Image: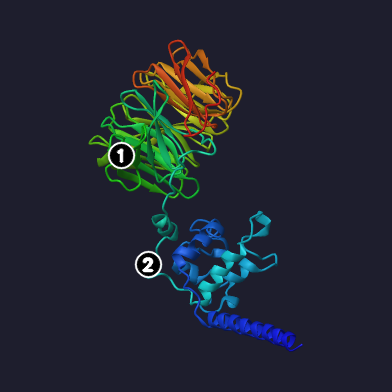
Amino acid sequence: MKSFRFCVFCALLSALILWLLRYSESSTCAQSPAAPVSFINDVAPILKDYCFACHDAKKRSGKYEMTTFARLIAGGSNGETVSPGKPQESDLYDLMVTNEDRRMPPRKDGISAVPKEKAEIVRRWIEQGAKLDSGIDTKSDLVKELRVRWQPPASPTQYKFAMPVTALAFTPDGKELVAGGHHELTVWNVDSSKLTKRLRTRAERALAMLFHRDGSLIVAGSRPGQEGDIRVYNLQAAGKKEGEVIFLDGVSDPQVFRKQLLDSDDSILCLAISPDGNLLAAGGCDRTIRVWDVSAGARRAKLEQVIDNHADWVFALAFDATGERLLSCARDKTAKIWDLMNRESITTFPEHQNNVYGVAWSKDGKKAFSAGADHVLRQWEAVPQGKQLKVLGGHNEDILKLLSSPDRLLLATAGADKTVKIWEAETQKNTKTLSGLTDQVYSLALSPDGKLLAAGDYNGEVRIWNLADAKLVKGFNASPGIATISKK
């Protein structure tokens, strides 16, 4: 009996000691100050994801702009939204967690509420005094501040899913083909279809690329909805070789990443270079066309013109033979011609009545071609009135790309119908249809000698054809680790 009582006593004593230890632990934790919350590293990313879309400098919903710290604290039409040290009296926090219809982001827009754990970060920041990190100006653009601090992830060694091939370019010697990947460019030997190089990029996607005559690779990149850039790379720089593949760091190696020409708030969608290699043009989601003088080399580019000639995203550009006129097309359903010498718009072609995705010039520069979401290729007078001359069918779905050969004798169109079509520019005859791709065709590239045409699709597939006889030369998937779906 005594032994039993002793055991019960021991058990009770042990439980009491354990309870006291836990109480002491929790009491200590409760008394210790919470870890400091960084505005720029912890809070600003939450605001960017859930608030900036309606409260940026353009929309200013409720007359409230949140993209600078000063304006965030100042509040909107209803006054201040942040009461330092008092989260329960701060609308910024209250509107995130309320169950009422006034919740932000608005329920009516079908946007998810700020997750509880993220709202808690905002609450703690306010509780700690709603302070801005030292070294940051209260008037600084928070989007740019976040962009500077963001670091791209490493590209996967082996892709789990195929990446759409949104840009292609043959190297100047025609021996290799560069394709856009996930935060990287991949380089493939044309003869063997083997991967030879992988160049890491800040951009998630490459949307356009071309080589300058100095050998530099100019790439328009994007993190959709967040940033866009134009960067100059040196593909011939020394890299780290692993097996048969050379890895190049286009993010931090100055021998690879040679120059940044543009840093934008959204995607840059297209590039064009004049026939003499002296001018470079770019357009994108900000509706603006920019033109640089690159006569002294891509690294010495000088911005010459900023053109606001479209009301929506600019999808494609093309210089005429003289380099004095620039053809463009956009989501505003028009194709336009800009006189670079006189800096004025001279022609607008409105007949597509839908998105226009590609443009090209005739050999004599008197006519222009455009194609888009209406499934047709249109020919029209470049001057003076933009009169429509011909409507050419052939594709069953949207025409996503239009490419002209350097001599302007041939045109190539790529469609959402998985085909590429070749046209004689002078006669406007569809002479060949190239098949073998397995999904919508997003990119086209012509070899420097004009003999090979490459195309890339949504499934990551790349096909290379001989233009003379339309025969398939090579086929492979440009996502490392993904097997080719078909070669026929």
- Image quadrant assignment for residue 53: bottom right
SS type, badge 2: loop
The circle on residue 221 is none
Mark 1–mark 2 CB contact (< 8 Å): no
88 or 465, which is in the foreground? 465
Quarter of the image holding residue 30? bottom right
Q: Which of 365 and 209 is in front in this view?
A: 209
Q: Where residue 62 sits: x, y (%)? A: 57, 64
Q: Mark 1 points at which residue?
A: 239
Q: Residue furthest left?
A: 296
Amino acid beneath label 1: Gly
In primary-sequence order, the first of circles 1 and 2 is 2
Few, some or many residues within 10 Å of mark 2 (<14, 14–19, 20+): some
For label 1, count other residues whose C-alpha is less than 10 Å away and answer few (under 14), some (14-19) or many (20+): some
Q: Position of residue 147 (x, y in %)?
A: 42, 55
Percent x, y of residue 118:
57, 64
Q: Is residue 280 above or below residue 1?
A: above
Give the Cα distance between marks 1 and 2: 38 Å
Residue 77 can be seen, yes or no: no
Residue 184, percent from left and from top: 42, 40
Q: Compare residues 346 and 184 and report the one nearer the observer.
A: 184
Look at 57% across and 18% down and name the residue there.
394
| Kind of residue at disc 2 | Asp
Q: From this viewpoint, is residue 10 visible?
A: yes
Split into 4 quadrants, where in the image is the C terminus?
top right
The structure residue drawn at horizontal position 58% and vertical position 21%, both measured from the top left corner, is 395
Hey, which residue is sitting farthest right in the picture? 1
Question: Mark 1: which secondary structure?
Answer: loop
- Look at the picture and state if 466 lies above or below 13: above
* Residue beneath disc 2: 137
